Image: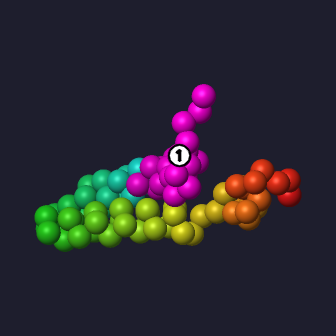
Amino acid sequence: MRPEYPERAMCIQCMATAMSSVGAASGTRAWLGSKFGARIGPVAMRRVTVGLFAAAVLASGVGLSGSTHSVPAHAAIHGAAR
């Protein structure tokens, strides 16, 4: 028997997109640190990190869409075909 999840639970595809976006932001942060480490202080680097991670999560959650069209809520609840 499958457990019931609330509707607001995040799907695996969305979570994978968010994780890969944060991974890309982490790589960008590492590149910035190695390229401009002497010019960027620790406080500025912390701000860059927060900004990159926030932008990555927002871009993956808002800016990217799935590969299929969304199903209306009433159709998903009642199992109606599209």
Picture coordinates of residue 55, whole percent (x, y): 41, 68
Amino acid type, mark 1 = Tyr
Q: Residue furthest left?
A: 42
Camera-side residue of 10 and 46: 10
- What secondary structure is found at the residue carrying circle 1? loop
Whether residue 45 can be seen here: yes
Whether 68 is drawn above or below 40: the answer is above
Q: For residue 2, which quarter of the picture?
A: top right
Residue that appears at 77% across and 59% down: 75
Q: Residue furthest right?
A: 82
Q: Which residue corresponds to mark 1?
A: 5
Picture coordinates of residue 16, whole percent (x, y): 52, 47
Q: Residue furthest top?
A: 1
Residue 43: in magenta span: no
Q: Residues within 10 Å of mark 1 (few under 14, many from 20)?
A: few
User: With 5 as the anchor, is 48 left or right in this view?
Assistant: left
Picture coordinates of residue 40, whole percent (x, y): 19, 68
Per the rendered image, the range of residues in magenta is 1-22
Camera-side residue of 34 and 59: 59
User: With 81 as the anchor, is 41 left or right in this view?
Assistant: left
Q: Quadrant of the N terminus?
A: top right
User: With 8 as the anchor, is 73 left or right in this view?
Assistant: right
Q: For residue 62, which quarter of the picture?
A: bottom right
